[in-house]
Amino acid sequence: MTATGSTWRNWARTETARPARVERPATPSAVQRAVRAAAAQGLGIKAVGAGHSFTGIAVAPGVLLDLTDLSGLLSVDRDTARATFLAGTRLHQLPALLAPYGLALANMGDIDRQSIAGATSTGTHGTGIGFGGLATQIVSVTLVDGTGEFVRVSESENAELLPAARLGLGALGIVVEVTLQLVPAYVLHAVERPESLDEVLGAWEERVRAADHFEFYWFPHTDRALTKTNTRLPADAPLKPLGRVGRWVDDELLANGLYRATCALGTAVPAIVPRFAKIVDRVTGNREFTDLSPNVFVTNRTVRFKEMEYAIPLAEVPAALAEIRALIDERGWRISFPLEIRAAAADDNWLSTAYGRESGYIAVHRYYREDEREYFAAVEAILFGRGGRPHWGKMHSLGAEELASIYPRFDDFRAIRDLLDPAGLFTNAYLRRVLGNPSAESADGRATHAFPAEG
């Protein structure tokens, strides 16, 4: 995220905003004051973390709350392995904060630049059929609602709201604190290998269920898959990390440097993309190492891109990818970015892409200087046709009517949204598109819920 003067833009450069003002609260009370001031002035208000969403979910035309300073570890309960963080804390800060307590996140995605609140509110996830997205790790969340009151949601307070508040799209209020259920720190044994795409797809469910964490990348115009299999080990397992030079060569020189050159050249001369895809496929992704979990899960990505990702029923992945592969060949597109394929457990968060079903994820990307519209639209049609649900923080075209048809608790979530934010203080163009307009404000301008208000 960058904010130059009064202009804000997200990391992918897909969204910009010119907020009426920018505030940088450092405490929950400061967030509360900002919300009350915005409401009194008739201004909308939105919180932003790292700006890593590709959609307009965090665009703030009124008051932009930059939560960078609302950061840090508030408390740790060693007996329950739970820790409470301020909402703006970045995921990459967690390993150092948790190391003294011997704790870690149960699962992570491959990017850790996001804030805790931003990552959970948009449905960020990793891979592993035994693990849900980051929001499933939330056991308590505190937010400031549309009336400027604190609302605590946990297993013992307003518990009926927890399936909505864990993954709230920023529509229920400004999240200020999050309590996570953690696990003892652990080590991952990583095996990364290029394999036949057809063989990987043929054994897709078997591979997913046999591993703690399995995913693969497919470079269009090749017949190979770059597989990544991570096995969980105790924290005292011997470490065999990648050497500093080896990691730099693999992750910076090849994965970022060579890849950036491929994308840039491919934008100017699309015909060279298939040749370069085969080169990148041959020189990357053949290694084995053992390291602390954050060092294995996370990959440093410096090549800027646009992304769309859909969750589909787990068994649909091979057929869907085959259809996408045929589509690319048929249209003659030159796609320089690989597709990423992952899996996750079913969960009970109402707006989770994995709500009620084990899910496979197919993510497509385009270099940020390329026009993604035709490619994304065609792939979206395939994935939506197979029961797909779009990642809330990544590009898609669906509106409230379509989304209501694929989320069984969609109307329940909207009812909670209207209860906590009756005047639509936290809405914006994106949220109006995906959720519809909020209900009318109550007569006195305040929500009429029965939740305890604490200042």
Image (spheres, rainbow, N blue to C red):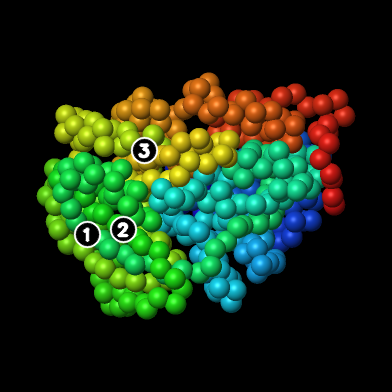
> Residue beneath label 1, please?
193
Asked if the residue under mark 3 is in contact with the one under mark 1, i.e. CB atoms within 8 Å, the reply is: no
| Residue that badge 3 annotates | 314
Residue at (39%, 34%) from the top-left corner?
A: 312
Say what secondary structure mark 1 lies in. strand
- 10 Å neighbourhood of mark 2: few (<14), some, or many (≥20)? many
Amino acid bearing label 3: Leu
Q: CA distance from mark 2 to mark 1?
A: 9 Å
- The numbered dot on residue 13 is none
Q: Is residue 246 above or below residue 195?
A: below
Distance in Å between CA atoms under marks 2 and 3: 17 Å
What residue lies at 41% left-to-right and 31% top-to-bottom? Answer: 388
Q: Is residue 62 visible?
A: no
Residue hosting label 2: 229
Q: Earlier in the sequence, mark 1 or mark 3?
A: 1
Q: Residues within 10 Å of mark 3 (few under 14, many from 20)?
A: many
* Quarter location, residue 319: top left
Is 237 above or below relative to 33? below
State which quadrant residue 145 falls in: top right
Please provide percent x and percent y for residue 75.
Answer: 70, 67
Q: Residue at x 36, y 27 (%)?
A: 386
The spot of residue 222 in percent (x, y) is 15, 46
Q: State if disc 3 and disc 2 touch (CB < 8 Å).
A: no
Q: Is 261 located above or below residue 371 in the figure?
A: below
Q: CA distance from mark 1 to mark 3?
A: 22 Å
Q: Earlier in the sequence, mark 2 or mark 1?
A: 1
Mark 1 and mark 2 in contact (Cβ < 8 Å)?
A: yes
Q: Position of residue 352 (x, y in %)?
A: 52, 39
Nearer to us in this view, 374 or 124: 124
Q: Residue at x 80, y 44 (%)?
A: 148
